[in-house]
Structure formats: structure tokens, C-alpha cells
């Protein structure tokens, strides 16, 4: 019990320090893990179990939201394959160069060892990137979908590598897994009939661990991959989206154990610290290659840059690759500590580059020449709003209610904008005038600027930072109409006033006032 109290105190302290420094708490958790390892606190078997549960639930929730068609798009699979090959080659040469300089344990390495290390460095962190996208509400933005698709293909490549190097082929019983298709469909129909709030989390954990993790692990296939597959089989629906939201808190809590275990994996010495710092110099090259490849795949400069910034880190899967290589005598054991430290430092670097708004990504995008509109993928071209005189940005439940109310107003021609393609598809099927777009995208507002008919903009984006960025971009244009925003905190009113917002409404206070009005209307006379 005492060790667990130390874990909790260290995690809380590390997360608090990271939050004060405006870094993601997970960076603090990793730092806390290194501090615990330096202090000699042991890593318990239970922490490893919790860590594995966290990653399993993460992949399960990704599967719930995954549109499998995304993986089949050329700009996803081709970019992933080309990047693994290109960056892997460059990283192999870089590590060989360090060996040629005689740097400690790299000096006696072989080309095979260098290639495995480079392969490990080629991966990007699924845990970090998805957590980062969730914090910004960008999971369904185009760059977010592209980044997650790339991550999933990389994870599949890692699973294949681990199976080959580990020398273990799937059991002949693996063919039985095809029965999961009707089994999961039956479970989904059963769930819809018995769905209750107090059963939702239990159902999700059961599906992730039993037909997911346990079934796949039993036939010699990575169990975390099984959780992902079962999530995909459950399908991306409104009900599964609610299930993913219910699992958000348990998943985040369990992932604290994962980040602590990274630090506890080994205490770095001077050689490991120096080599990890040198490996960080490869991150700009990694991001630059992503931008070049995504532009080649016909994505816009800003979309390419946003995805590249998110993916410019090293991965927990890289540590697993090195761990397996160490176990089979293919890689020196010092590499495991070095890669673990490089992973943690890369999280800090990516968090700083992608912190707050997308200024850094926009700066990167400006370094590349713009291309004609017709060259770009249809989903990444500029948005035409025609003669609309009112915009609703963000079409979640609150934004949709505002959109419906404004469309009833005579004289208003309302267009809704949201970055979630699933929401847009559903509303377009109903005949609504909505278009897919990112309100924090500077180019969107540059296009809208020339429309003198625009009179009203209502912002209902998923978080305060997104609303702030979008309103700031709007105010840099010639827009002279009214701006309204939904907020979750009435204390932010002064900040909205500084941005020139004409009307703001606290979501919870507004709901309470509306409920009171409805009650008064229906009271007996």
C-alpha cells in the first residue's frame, strides 16, 4: 500500500508541476516516473497491469470512433509507408554516424542493431497524439483523422515486427476470431436493448478486455490490437460515441500508470541523457518529411503542418520494439533507457510546439508555396459560403440548437461549419446547409473576409481555447457584424469583451435560466 501512495503522490506532484508550466500533465507523469526510479522506488507488477489496461482502453476507444475508410485513403497509407521507409533509412544513417564517432555503447553496434533502433524511432506516440487531439477537440478534424490513421497503420507494422522477431506465429485457432464479427454485432444489439448509464462503463471494459484483449492474446495475437479490432466492429454510431465518452475518465486514470512506468523503466546516466538529447535533433527532420509527404498526397499546407507537428514525437511502441530486441539479444540494453528518455523529451518538445494555438503550424505552413485549389483533395479545399449572412461555428448539441433557431429567423441565410465529417454528413443528408471546415484555420477566415453580407457569427466550439482562436482570427478580418459565443464559465466574460464579443452565454447558467422559464410558463395559473 505504501508504494501505491508514493505512486499517487509522485503522479499528482508531477502533473501539477507540468500544468503550472502549461505542459500536458502526462509530461509530468513521465518525469515523476524518472524521479521514482532515481529514488529507488520499485515498479510493481500491478502498475504494469494498470498500464496495459490503459493502453488497451485507449485503442478500444479509438476503434469506436474509427472510420475504416480513412485507412484506405492514399494520403494515409501511402504517407505512412513512405515515411517509415524514408525516415527509417535516414535514422539508420544517423545512428551509424554516432557509432562512427565512437559514442559509448553505439560504437560496437551492428547495422542490424542500428536499423532496429531507427525502426523504433520511426513510430509516433498513439497515446500522446490522441490525448493531445482530445484536449483540443480535434479528433474529427481532417488533420486529426489523418494523424490517427497514420498512427494505426504504424501500430499494425509494429505488431507484425514483434510477431516476427519474437518468433511466435499466431495459433491455428486464430481463424476462430472470425466468429467475433457476429458475436460483436449480437453484443451491440443486446447493449442497445439494455443500455443503462450504470452499465455503460462495465460493458465497454468487458468488450475491450474479453472478446478484445483476451480472445486475441489467447491465439498468439497482440491483445491491444484485439481491443482496437473489437472497437471497430462495434461501429461508429451515436451510441458508441457515448460509450467512448463514458470510458474517457477511467482510460485517462489508467494511462497515468502507463506514463509512470515509462520513467520507471530505467534511470538514465550521462551517456543515455546525451544520446537521447542528440536523438531529439531528428524530430524536425521527422516532421519536415511528414509535411513533404502530406503535401505530395494533396493536402493543404496548414493541414499537413498541423498533422506533422502532432506526429513529431517518438513512441511508446518504439520502447516495446527495443525491449523485444533487447530480450532476443539484437539490441544493447542501454538503448531501452535511451529511447525511453527520448520518448519523454519528445513529448515535451511536441507539447511546446503545439501548445495553445496553431501559430507554430501556421508558421511552418507559410514556409511552403501555396498550390492551386484544384490540386488539393476535395475535403481540404477552401469553403464557399455563398451569400450567407450568418454562421454557426461548431455543430454539437449546443451549436445545433443555435443553428436551428437562427434558420427560423426571417431574412437570415445560415450556414453551419464543423470539423467533424460524420456530423456534416449526417446533417447534409437531412438537407441542412452545412459545410466541413476548421474555425481555427486562418485561411478559412481569409476567404470569408470579402463577403459584405455577413452579419452574425455564433461560436459553439468544443472548448474555450478553440473559441478564442477562432474569434481572434475573425476579428483580424473586415468582419463588422455581431459575435456571440457559448462558454462554460461565466467568469470568462471579461476575456470575451476584450476580444470584441458582443454576447456570451454560460452554458450551465443559460440552461438553468431556460429551465426556470419553462417551469414558470407551465405553473398553474
Image: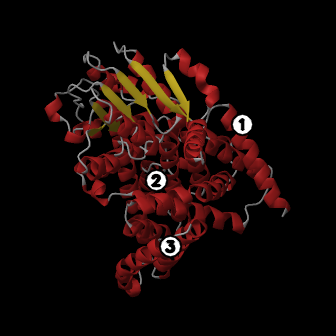
The mark nearer the N terminus, 3 or 1, is 1
Sooner in the amino-acid sequence: mark 3 or mark 2: 2
Q: Please identify the quarter of the rendering in which residue 209 is found.
A: bottom right
- Residue 145 vs residue 471: left or right? left
Residue that protrudes farthest toward the left in the picture: 374
Q: Tell me where residue 362 sits by quadrant.
A: top left
Q: Secondary structure at mark 3?
A: helix
**Closer-to-camera residue (114/20):** 20
Q: Position of residue 293 (x, y in %)?
A: 28, 40
Residue 224 is left or right of residue 156, and the answer is right
Residue under label 3, please give it: 207
Residue 85: in sight, yes or no? no
In the rendered structure, which disc, 2 or 1, sits on the residue that comes first in sequence?
A: 1
520 and 226: which is toward the camera: 520
Q: Nearer the viewer, residue 16 or 509?
A: 509
Q: Residue at x 67, y 36 (%)?
A: 19
Name the element at disc 1.
helix
Q: Position of residue 383 (x, y in %)?
A: 24, 31
Q: Which residue does the image show at 46% across and 53% down from the upper left?
A: 120
Q: Which mark is residue 120?
A: 2
Report the disc number at residue 17. 1
Q: Quadrant of the N terminus?
A: bottom right
Q: Residue at x 69, y 54 (%)?
A: 264
Question: Looking at the picture, how far across and down is residue 74, in whole percent?
Answer: 23, 50
- Which mark is drawn over residue 76? none
Amino acid at each position: 500500500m505504501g508504494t501505491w501512495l508514493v505512486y499517487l503522490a509522485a503522479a499528482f506532484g508531477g502533473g501539477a508541476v507540468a500544468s503550472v508550466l502549461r505542459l500536458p500533465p502526462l509530461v509530468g507523469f513521465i518525469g515523476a516516473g524518472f524521479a521514482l526510479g532515481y529514488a529507488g522506488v520499485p515498479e510493481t507488477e500491478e502498475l504494469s497491469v494498470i498500464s496495459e489496461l490503459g493502453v488497451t482502453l485507449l485503442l478500444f476507444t479509438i476503434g469506436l470512433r474509427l472510420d475504416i475508410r480513412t485507412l484506405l485513403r492514399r494520403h494515409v497509407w501511402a504517407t505512412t509507408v513512405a515515411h517509415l521507409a524514408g525516415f527509417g533509412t535516414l535514422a539508420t544513417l544517423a545512428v551509424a554516424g554516432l557509432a562512427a564517432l565512437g559514442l559509448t555503447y553505439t560504437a560496437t553496434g551492428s547495422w542490424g542493431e542500428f536499423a532496429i533502433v531507427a525502426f523504433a524511432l520511426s513510430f509516433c506516440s498513439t497515446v500522446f497524439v490522441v490525448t493531445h487531439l482530445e484536449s483540443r477537440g480535434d479528433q474529427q478534424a481532417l488533420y486529426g483523422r489523418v494523424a490517427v490513421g497514420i498512427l494505426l497503420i504504424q501500430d499494425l507494422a509494429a505488431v507484425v515486427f514483434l510477431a516476427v522477431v519474437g518468433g511466435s506465429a499466431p495459433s491455428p485457432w486464430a481463424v476462430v476470431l472470425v466468429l467475433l464479427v457476429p458475436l460483436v454485432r449480437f453484443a451491440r444489439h443486446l447493449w442497445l436493448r439494455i443500455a443503462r448509464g450504470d452499465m455503460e462503463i462495465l460493458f465497454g471494459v468487458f468488450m475491450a478486455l474479453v472478446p478484445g484483449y483476451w480472445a486475441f492474446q489467447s491465439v498468439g495475437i497482440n491483445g491491444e490490437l484485439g481491443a482496437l479490432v473489437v472497437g471497430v466492429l462495434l461501429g461508429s454510431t451515436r451510441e458508441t460515441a457515448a460509450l467512448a465518452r463514458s470510458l474517457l475518465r477511467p482510460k485517462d486514470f489508467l494511462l497515468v500508470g502507463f506514463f509512470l512506468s515509462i520513467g520507471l523503466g530505467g534511470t538514465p546516466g550521462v551517456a543515455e541523457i546525451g544520446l537521447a538529447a542528440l536523438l531529439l535533433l531528428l524530430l524536425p527532420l521527422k516532421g519536415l518529411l511528414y509535411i513533404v509527404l502530406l503535401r505530395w498526397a494533396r493536402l493543404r499546407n496548414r493541414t499537413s503542418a498541423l498533422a506533422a507537428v502532432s506526429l513529431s514525437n517518438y513512441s511508446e511502441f518504439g520502447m516495446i520494439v527495443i525491449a523485444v530486441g533487447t530480450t532476443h539479444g539484437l539490441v544493447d540494453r542501454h538503448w531501452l533507457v535511451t529511447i525511453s528518455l527520448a520518448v519523454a523529451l519528445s513529448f515535451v518538445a511536441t507539447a511546446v510546439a503545439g501548445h495553445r494555438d496553431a501559430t507554430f503550424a501556421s508558421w511552418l505552413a507559410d514556409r511552403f508555396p501555396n498550390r492551386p485549389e484544384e490540386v488539393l483533395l476535395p475535403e481540404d479545399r477552401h469553403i464557399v459560403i455563398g451569400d450567407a449572412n450568418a454562421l454557426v461555428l461548431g455543430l454539437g448539441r449546443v451549436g445545433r440548437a443555435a443553428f436551428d433557431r437562427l434558420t427560423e429567423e426571417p431574412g437570415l441565410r445560415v450556414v453551419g461549419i464543423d470539423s467533424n465529417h460524420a456530423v456534416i454528413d449526417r446533417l447534409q443528408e437531412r438537407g441542412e446547409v452545412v459545410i466541413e471546415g476548421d474555425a481555427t484555420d486562418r485561411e478559412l477566415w481569409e476567404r470569408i473576409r470579402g463577403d459584405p453580407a455577413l452579419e452574425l457569427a455564433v461560436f459553439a466550439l468544443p472548448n474555450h481555447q478553440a473559441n478564442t482562436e477562432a474569434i481572434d482570427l475573425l476579428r483580424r478580418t473586415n468582419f463588422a457584424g455581431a459575435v456571440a459565443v457559448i462558454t462554460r464559465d461565466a467568469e470568462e466574460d471579461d476575456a470575451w469583451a476584450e476580444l470584441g464579443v458582443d454576447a456570451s452565454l454560460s452554458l450551465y447558467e443559460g440552461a438553468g435560466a431556460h429551465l426556470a422559464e419553462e417551469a414558470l410558463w407551465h405553473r398553474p395559473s
